């Protein structure tokens, strides 16, 4: 299975009772990317397996309710779920460390919220694919990891913090240009 397999194709296999085939295909094509992403962002293999299993469970749940057929790219969809859950998990861990008395927020969504989140995630994934791997990593480090330009320069091999800052600006400009070329993206991201 390639990462461009549609949710409709997976849903058809599940509804045909071919669960073993679906699991083998998802595990062989998507788990390696999940593991790589989680390990790259400070997690363990066990955490990658947990997130992947959560993601597979979500795919089955969406399939049984008929919502999976709306997904154009199952690999991209699953990876976005993995990324979002990893970000939420690390944020939650940080919150628990800094404010242990706060209650945990439930992760349950209604169908409207789920569809909006899936559309936003798909849009963001598409945008990140358009700007390239180097920009994606640079923006991840500066926006989500909140690293200093000196740290980013060191991690990504820039000559100094000013070079990292200039590249960061250029990457943000690429995103702005995408938004300017496709005004509909702004409304999706704001919803």
Image (cartoon, rainbow, N blue to C red):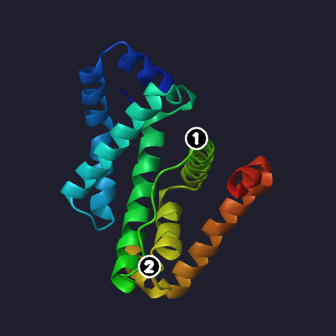
Residue located 52% across and 79% down the image: 164
| Residue 66 in picture, x, y percent from top left | 51, 25
170 vs 117, nearest the viewer: 117
Residue located 47% across and 85% down the image: 148
| Residue 175 in picture, x, y percent from top left | 67, 60
Question: Which image quarter holds the N terminus?
Answer: top left
| Residue 191 in picture, x, y percent from top left | 71, 54
The secondary element bearing badge 1 is classed as helix
Residue lying at the far left of the rendered structure: 46
Residue under pointer 1 = 111
Instruction: Using a 10 Å C-alpha cutoff, classify the residue at mark 2 as few (fewer than 14 neighbours), some (14 to 19) or many (20 or more).
Output: many
Residue lying at the far top of the rendered structure: 16
Residue located 38% across and 31% down the image: 60
Direction from residue 186 to residue 164 in the image, left or right: left
Direction from residue 161 to residue 19 in the image, left or right: left
Q: CA distance from mark 1 to mark 2?
A: 38 Å
Q: Of the residues tagged 1 and 2, which is closer to the observer?
A: 1
Of the image marks 1 and 2, the number of the one nearer the N terminus: 1
187 vs 182, nearest the viewer: 187
Query: Up-down: is 167 above or below 119?
Result: below
172 vs 84, nearest the viewer: 84
Query: Up-down: is 150 above or below 39?
Result: below
Query: Up-down: is 82 above or below 165?
Result: above
Residue under pointer 2 = 152
| Residue 82 in picture, x, y percent from top left | 39, 51
Q: Are marks 1 and 2 in contact (CB under 8 Å)?
A: no
């Amino acid at each position: 299975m390639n990462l461009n397999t549609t949710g409709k194709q997976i849903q058809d296999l599940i509804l045909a009772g071919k669960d073993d085939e679906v699991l083998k295909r998802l595990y062989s094509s998507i788990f390696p990317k999940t593991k790589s992403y989680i390990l790259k962002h400070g997690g363990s293999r066990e955490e990658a397996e947990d997130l992947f299993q959560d993601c597979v469970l979500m795919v089955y749940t969406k399939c049984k309710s008929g919502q999976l057929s709306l997904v154009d790219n199952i690999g991209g969809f699953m990876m976005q779920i993995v990324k979002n859950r990893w970000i939420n998990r690390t944020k939650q861990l940080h919150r628990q460390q800094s404010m242990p008395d706060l209650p945990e927020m439930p992760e349950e969504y209604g169908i409207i919220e789920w569809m909006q989140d899936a559309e936003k995630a798909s849009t963001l994934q598409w945008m990140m694919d358009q700007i390239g791997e180097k920009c994606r990593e640079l923006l991840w480090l500066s926006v989500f990891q909140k690293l200093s330009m000196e740290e980013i320069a060191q991690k990504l091999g820039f000559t100094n913090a000013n070079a990292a800052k200039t590249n960061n600006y250029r990457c943000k400009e690429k995103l702005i240009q995408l938004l300017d070329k496709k005004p509909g993206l702004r409304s999706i991201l704001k919803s």
